[in-house]
Structure formats: C-alpha cells, structure tokens
Amino acid sequence: MRKRVAVLCGAAAVVAATLAAAPVEAADASYAAKLAWKSCGTTDHPTLQCASLKVPLDHDNPGGQRITLALTRVPHTAKTYQGPLLVNPGGPGGSGLSLAGFVASTLPKKVAAQYDVIGFDPRGVGKSTPTLDCKPGHFDPVRPDSVPVTEAIERANLARVQSFAKACGTKYAKLLPYIDTVSAVRDMDAIRTAVGARQINYFGYSYGTYLGAVYAKLYPRHVRRLVLDSIVDPSGVWYDDNLTQDVAFNDRHRALMAWIAKYDATYHLGTDPEKVEAKWYAMRASLAKKPAGGKVGASELEDTFLPGGYFNGYWPYLAEAFAAYVNTKNADPLVETYENFGAVDASGDNGFSVYSSVQCRDAAWPRDWEQWRADNWATYEKAPFMTWNNAWYNASCAFWPTKSLRPVNVANHKLPPVLLFQATNDAATPYEGGALTHALLRGSSLVVEEGGGNHGITLSGNACLDKHLAAYLTDGTVPRADGPVDAVCKTLPDPKPLTSKVAAPSAHGTALHGLLGFRG
C-alpha cells in the first residue's frame, strides 16, 4: 500500500497537465428561491421534508429554460447549528432523496441534530424533472452474451449500444448538453443559495466523491466541510477508470469464490477456490446456452454477481443460488437472486440513462471501436469476470450524440481540511483513487479500511470509521499522521452463511448499500 501511495503522490503533479482548469470561482447564483418545505409523509423517516427548486437548464443562460430539482431535508433540532449537509449516493444517476433520512438517522444523534441534512435528485434523476429514460427495457433479459467470442455476438451487442445512444439523442437532444457533472455542481450551489447558506457541508459516496471534488474546485470558498467515501480516481474519468474497475472486480469475485470454498460444509462446491471458480464459469457457459427461467443468461448472471463486488453482505445469497444451480440443478434460487440483485426496473432505466449521459458528456471516450476491442480483450485476459459486461455498459459513449467536455482538474489547495475514506480492496473505486485524491487535495486526511472490500464504508457498521466521521462533523477534527495515510481501521469480518447462528451483516451496511445501488 505504501509503495502505491508514493507513486501516486509523485504522479499528482502530472494530472494538471491532462485535465481542464476550472473557473477560479464561479459567481453566486443571481437569485435566491424560498423553498416550501413540507412533510414527505414517509413512515421510515417521519421528520423528512420535501421541496423543489427550479434552476436553469443552462447556468450560463439563467433567463432560459428551467428544470426542477427534487429535494429532501431532515432539519436540525439542536441549538448549535452547523449549516446544511448535502449528501449524494453516487451513480451518476443515483437518487439522493432517501439518503438524507438514512444519514440523519444513522449519524450519532448529537451530530445529526446540528445539521440540516439535505438530499437531492440530480438533474434528470428520479423526481427531478424532466427525467431521462432513453430506452425503457434496455436491460430486459435475455441479452446477448457479453463476451464477443463471435462476430455475431459482437454485432448484436454493438447494435444494442448504438440503438441506446441514438434513442438518447433523439429523445433528449436539447437536454443532453446539460447533463454533466459541472452542471450538477452548479445546481448544488443553487441549493446552497436557496437555503440561505454562505457555505455547505458535503458528504458523498462513490461518484458523489467526484461531484464533491468538482464542487470544491469551482466553489472553494463555499466549502465548510467535505467528506468523500470510496473515491473516484479523478485522473481516469471515465474510460480508464472503467478498465481499472474490471481488474478490481475480478479480484473481488475471486475473493467470493475463496469465501465459498471456506464454507464447503454449507455449499458443497469444493474447498479449492480455483475449482469453485471453474464451476462458476461452467455455470456461466451452461446459462449462455440455456438461460435459467428464460431470464438468466450469461450476461444476467454477471449482473447478478456484480453486487457481490460492492458489498460482501450479499455473498451468502449469491452462494446459495450458485450452489443450488450446480448441486441440485435447481435454477429457481438463481432466478430469484437475479430479480433481487440484477434485474433493472424503471428507476434503473432512468439511472442508467443519466449515468450514460453524464459520463459520455464529462470526458472524451474513444470513438474508434478498434481501441475498445483491443483494450477490453487485453483486460479480459487477466480479468474475465466482468470486463466485457462493463464494456457494453459504457460503450454507448463511443457513439454518443453530444460532444465531450474536458474533465475538471480537482487539485485544490484552497480548502479547509477534507476527510477521505477508502477501503484497500474496493472494486468500484479502487484504492489508487483515494490515494491520488489525498495527494491532490492539500491538507486532506485519509482514513483507510485495511483489508476492506466494500464500496461505501462509513455508516455501514465499522465503529472505527464512524468515530472519525463523527469527530469531523462535530468540530472539524481530522486524524493526522506521518506517511501516506492518516488513520487505519480494521475491516469488519466477512459474513457467515445464512444458516449460521452468527449475526447477519450489519443492518446499517445492508441499508446503505441498498441506497447506493451498483455501477457507480
């Protein structure tokens, strides 16, 4: 870990040469809206309030078309008020409305009571309007096998992604130029203005870490406190980051295979992780020929097991479905697990439409399919689990109808102390992203979960991590140490099989990962 950090620190100076410089300081929004907060009427979080805010579609044309952002808030109750705490679950394309209630109820009561915890659906997402849904049913089963071992399979997958890109361009030609990270960041500053705050506090997971870093770059004087958990590598947005993900997800998948082998008495798939993995790929080959229940083919199997790379609390469910299919030829548990973890509903269609729109607009992607083919086959050779699945998930960007922007150089020395959290074995946002961001944000503090592989690690049951989070949100205290990291927390134990009498995975962890979703 130390060697990797040292190399990345040396690379930090290079990043500025390849990324776009941000404005020195964007001007405050020229208007202040009065938000009409009212009860959301939710039983899980009865104090959660809802409101909406109109913002310009094009912030450079404030008198033009307006769009509406959906907001939620759990208001502060303490005499000591520390301002708004905006929260974001990532994506891009993730809804943040429910996250406000979760964060407010999961933080220590004395801490949460000092903040207005504010969630929001970014432009195009969920209850914000207009919403994007480029091609409903894009992920309906059964899709072509993700691995293009024949020209016919490659053509079928290419046709799907080209059709999706064309549908987005046809339906949303006037919107797509404004569905991007910088526009979402300017929306966040409009929220700041609307709530009457001079500065905001911000807490983002996953893609939300990039959103927060870009906000801090554009509006450094508007940042009071900044928490980034499971951190995007800002030097690789987004094509290179996806290739890096592929290797990390393959490692996490192999960790799952080793966990299953450890519990052979439960799953009866063998004690050798490599042989267990071979059985998984044999299952994949079988499903490619005959999808389970007419729903779970090879690509859908990958979709089903991908969440295991985000959160090990899902491992027992995935293992049971795997074992039932292999040992008893019972496909029903696999179909059920796909429907719970892998299937995409209407909100997923919306999220994917925004995900694609933001990532394809944010940064340049190769437009030459030959490069995609070469890069992904090279990665597949060492990381077969989800390389091609991930490639097709993002390949619409090769054919996207809008021009790409240049990524923002998030290097920043104008901020108060920033608190960063990163697991060493995170697959969705590999460790290097956290280490590099630590180097780029001068004065930041990096807390590492040693040996952890989950994506989204605070408010997920690890008391050591949460102690640092609570201290920071209480009075701005961050850990400091010599060396590349400032504090190290041990990871939580892996889960036990569902048949075990040992406690199930952390309830907070399960709830959090249900809100964060997958892919972003």
Image (cartoon, grey):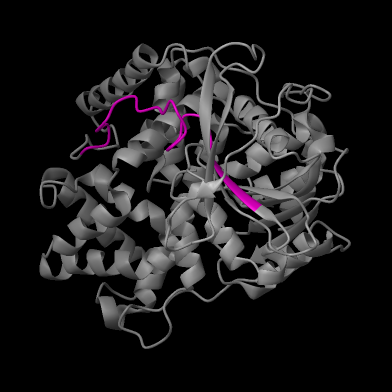
Q: Nearer the viewer, residue 201 or 382?
A: 201
Q: Nearer the viewer, residue 146 or 336?
A: 336
Can residue 377 be seen here? The reply is: no
Q: Position of residue 97 (x, y in %)?
A: 50, 47
Which residue is at a point 74% across and 65% down the rendered structure image? Answer: 78
Q: Position of residue 502 (x, y in %)?
A: 42, 86
Q: Position of residue 149 (x, y in %)?
A: 26, 33
Q: Which residues are magenta?
A: 117-140
Q: Is residue 51 left or right of residue 416?
A: left
Which residue is at a point 64% across and 66% down the rendered structure image? Answer: 107
Residue 416 within the magenta-colored segment of the rendering = no
Q: Is residue 432 left or right of residue 382?
A: right
Residue 130 within the magenta-colored segment of the rendering = yes
Figure check: 448 above or below 14 = below
Q: Is residue 157 left or right of residue 184?
A: left
Q: Is residue 501 left or right of residue 120?
A: left
Can residue 502 be seen here? The reply is: yes
Figure check: 444 above or below 240 = below
Q: Give residue 336's quadrant in the image.
A: bottom left
Q: Nearer the viewer, residue 130 or 255?
A: 130
From the image, give the main secondary structure of the stretch colored magenta. Answer: loop
Figure check: 212 above or below 179 = below
Q: Position of residue 101 (x, y in %)?
A: 54, 58
